[in-house]
Amino acid sequence: MNDITNRTDIEHLIDTFYSKVRKDDLLGPIFDTIIGNDWSHHLPIMYKFWDMVLFSAPGYAGSPVRKHTDIDKKMPMDRPHFDRWLAIWIETVDEMFVGEYADMAKNKASLMANLIHMKIQMSREGFETLN
């Protein structure tokens, strides 16, 4: 098994991960409601995002915190959602890759899940969220 080394690896990881998420009993309904059947917009954003996170590649322009706090207003997301998302992410990375960038992908995902969950909680409590 090899490490994550390029954009092609990222795309394969993201595609595999989201195929699992879409079938998941807890997460699938959220993604079905928010994204529906047309993933042609979401997947390229995720490719760019993870390419930026892992390899500092340019091209991603977005605010994950704001996006998720907006989604939470339509479909509340709580700790179990973030824990499940992270568990599927780690499982998928571990099935496909091993190495420094695979470890980084898991660590960054954990940090993001915790940050976004915290910001959602703050938003619900009326605190202004940071992006």
Image: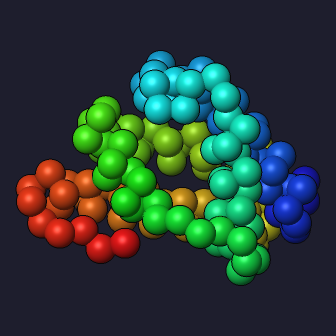
Q: Residue furthest left?
A: 125
Q: Dividing the image into 4 quarters, which one contains the C terminus? A: bottom left
Q: Report the residue at 31% width, 52% height from top.
A: 69
x, y percent for residue 35? 54, 32
Q: Relative to 115, is 56 on the left or the right?
A: right
- 79 relative to 62, above or below: above
Q: Position of residue 100 (x, y in %)?
A: 75, 73
Residue displayed at 81% across by 50% down: 11
**Picture quadrant where residue 41 is located:** top right
- Can residue 78 be seen here? no
Name above or below for residue 46 compared with residue 35.
Answer: below
Picture layout, residue 10 above or below residue 103: above
Q: Nearer the viewer, residue 4 or 33?
A: 33
Tell me if 55 is positioned left or right of 106 in this view.
right
Where residue 45 sits, quadrant-wise, is: bottom right
Residue at image location 39% in from the left, 51% down from the top: 68
Residue 7 shown left or right of residue 83 in the figure: right
Q: Residue at x 12, y 66 (%)?
A: 127
